[in-house]
Image (cartoon, coloured by chain):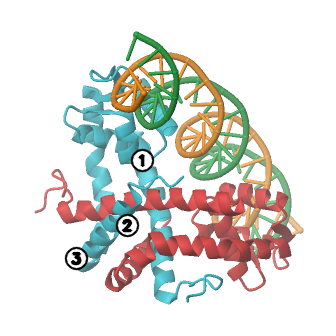
Chain colours: A cyan, B red, C green, D orange
Amino acid sequence: MSSPNEPRWLDQDEMAAWRGFVVASNLLNRRLERQLKEDSGLSHTQYEILVHLSAAPAGSLRMTELAEKLVTSKSGLTYQVTQLERMGLVGRRSCPSDVRGVMAELTDQGREAVRQAAPGHVALVRELLIDVLTREQLAALAEGLGEVSARLRPDDVP
Amino acid sequence: MSSPNEPRWLDQDEMAAWRGFVVASNLLNRRLERQLKEDSGLSHTQYEILVHLSAAPAGSLRMTELAEKLVTSKSGLTYQVTQLERMGLVGRRSCPSDVRGVMAELTDQGREAVRQAAPGHVALVRELLIDVLTREQLAALAEGLGEVSARLRPDDVP
DNA sequence: CTCCTGTTGTTCAAATTCGAACCAAGGTGT
DNA sequence: ACACCTTGGTTCGAATTTGAACAACAGGAG
């Protein structure tokens, strides 16, 4: 049998991949955060909320659904939607099919904010990540991390 | 000439890679955070501090150097080191070559904490990321994100 | 219909994070 | 030696984030 007492440590390649992932992730978030805040007065989280809403059928999504897409906690989303509401970029509606439900809805001003913020954001993502990778690396990232996400998604391990 | 007014949006593959990266990153952090907290009472940040220290020559590093390795703010590190100090896992020393300098130093108890926490952490990283990827994807990740990190590292864009 | 269980979104307190301001000390040029 | 600019860490206040506790409601079994 294998030996659970002696864990399988990461070899050099594996460690490089893991460190690269962690470091790149932190570094990227840092830069994107700064750029968005300076350029549009939005946090990365807020920007992503707006983007997900603008991609949704009616510019609106259920809170829970939105939280899942963002991979954030429900309470965190409640907070941010309130912030965006104060800024006039998002509004709350009650859900037609469920009295408890709340739909976050993009306002015209919100739509305009995305339109204004997107180009700079995309350009930076391209400059810092996309254009740095070869076509093969990009494909590997998409497939590999897609699979990683898929396996992680449905799980709700207590 | 190219048109900076019409930004180059991300095509399907590029978007998949970017979304995969963001989602996998959030999902992974979430899971690792929970596992470490439950298993060892440490946050991911705290765990990483301990790991970097235990890998350092004398189990100690300058605050600034440590902050750079962790890709975090100086003030954030100050806070976390103080927390770890209260837990008895890390101590502060003054730097011999620079009176201003502060060295964060792993205590015996801290070294023991890493030894105890590492197996479970590594196992989860392996299960959720490393073992999900093919050897090619892993190599692509290591090289690609390594390059991304390298380009991001030295920059201090004002 | 009624009870029971699972959802939904919010509220709350606690922990964390960041950037700006700050003080102390290094290093340099004159 | 002196003024000056950079570094190293900490402190401070403001903004976020999270999980647990809650209250209102949905959905189904009996």
Mark closest to the chain's N terminus, 3 or 2: 3
Mark closest to the chain's N terminus, 1 or 3: 1
Which amino acid is tagged 3? Arg
Q: Give the chain of mark 1.
A: A
Residue at image point 51% right, 88% down? A12
The Cα atoms of the two marked residues, 3 and 2, are separated by 20 Å
Q: Give the chain of mark 2.
A: A
Callout 1: SS: helix
Residue at image point 32% right, 23% down? A98
Circle 3 residue: A135
Q: Residue furthest left?
A: B1
Residue at image point 23% right, 39% down? A56
Asked whether B3 or A90 is in front, the reply is A90
The label nearer to you, 3 versus 2, is 2
Query: For residue B58, which quarter of the picture?
Result: bottom right
Q: Position of residue B34 (x, y in %)?
A: 59, 56
The Cα atoms of the two marked residues, 2 and 1, are separated by 22 Å
Which amino acid is tagged 2? Val
Q: Give the chain of mark 3.
A: A
**Tag count in the figure?**
3
Say whether marks 3 and 2 touch (CB < 8 Å): no
Q: Are the residues under badges 1 and 3 in a single subunit?
A: yes
Asked whether D22 or B90 is in front, the reply is D22
Structural crowding at the residue carrying mark 3, measured as other residues with C-alpha within 10 Å and reported as few (<14), some (14–19) or many (≥20): few
Circle 1 residue: A44
Q: Position of residue A68 (x, y in %)?
A: 38, 45
Circle 2 residue: A148
Quarter of the picture containing the N terminus of chain A is bottom right
Judge whether C17 appears above or below A74 on screen: below
Which numbered dot is residue B125?
Answer: none
Judge whether A129 appears above or below B75 on screen: below
